Image (cartoon, rainbow, N blue to C red):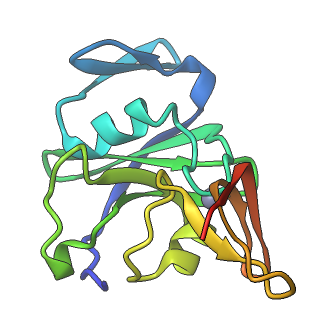
Amino acid sequence: MVKKKKKRNLIGRWPLSVVMCEDKQIVLEHNNITYKINNDKLRLQNFRSNGWKCKGCGRKATCVKITCTGEAIHLDLYDDNNLLFTHDHIKPTSRGGANTIENSQTLCEKCNSIKSNKLYNFQEPLKIICKETGKIYSGIVVGMTSRSVTLEQILEIPN
Ligand SMILES: [Zn+2]
């Protein structure tokens, strides 16, 4: 999905450790100035409920960048390598997915590009079939690259 980008003015960049999360607000302090960002937006609720981590590979966000467009304040998460974290809809809204916290997950840009527009939910077990034995297994995805998938809690599913 390509959105037309509005021009944003950078307010600041912080290590994520200085971000304090309250129920209603995210509070940032920088050069003795305090910035308060309302935490009621779905995007922030999602980042927060996912522990500021990618659901796909477990990478943790370490940096936050605050920008503004007019009155709207926007928060972006990054890791140390400047990898962007995104608010992803598990079932894409383009396929009728709801804009709710239950249908939300945090993905880094790498995992998001792997997921693309597929209906893949990183929180659901993934079923795999062993080519040699034909046995079926299920496991929880804990890591994913463009070439491999790492599973934990692998169980054999009886045929
Ligand atoms: Zn990731």
Residue 113 relative to residue 139: left or right: left
Q: Nearer the viewer, residue 97 or 14?
A: 97
Residue drawn at x 28%, y 76% as measured from the top left: 5
Q: Position of residue 99 (x, y in %)?
A: 15, 56
- Image-quarter location of ligand 1: bottom right
Residue 83 in view (yes/no): no
Residue 48 relative to residue 142: left or right: left
In which quarter of the view is residue 46 placed? top left
Residue drawn at x 49%, y 21% as measured from the top left: 19
Q: Position of residue 96 (x, y in %)?
A: 12, 74
Q: Is residue 144 above or below residue 9?
A: below
Q: Position of residue 98 (x, y in %)?
A: 13, 60
Q: Quadrant of the N terminus?
A: bottom left
Q: Is residue 10 above or below residue 126?
A: above
Residue 99 in view (yes/no): yes
Residue drawn at x 57%, y 49% as measured from the top left: 54
In which quarter of the view is residue 75 placed? top left
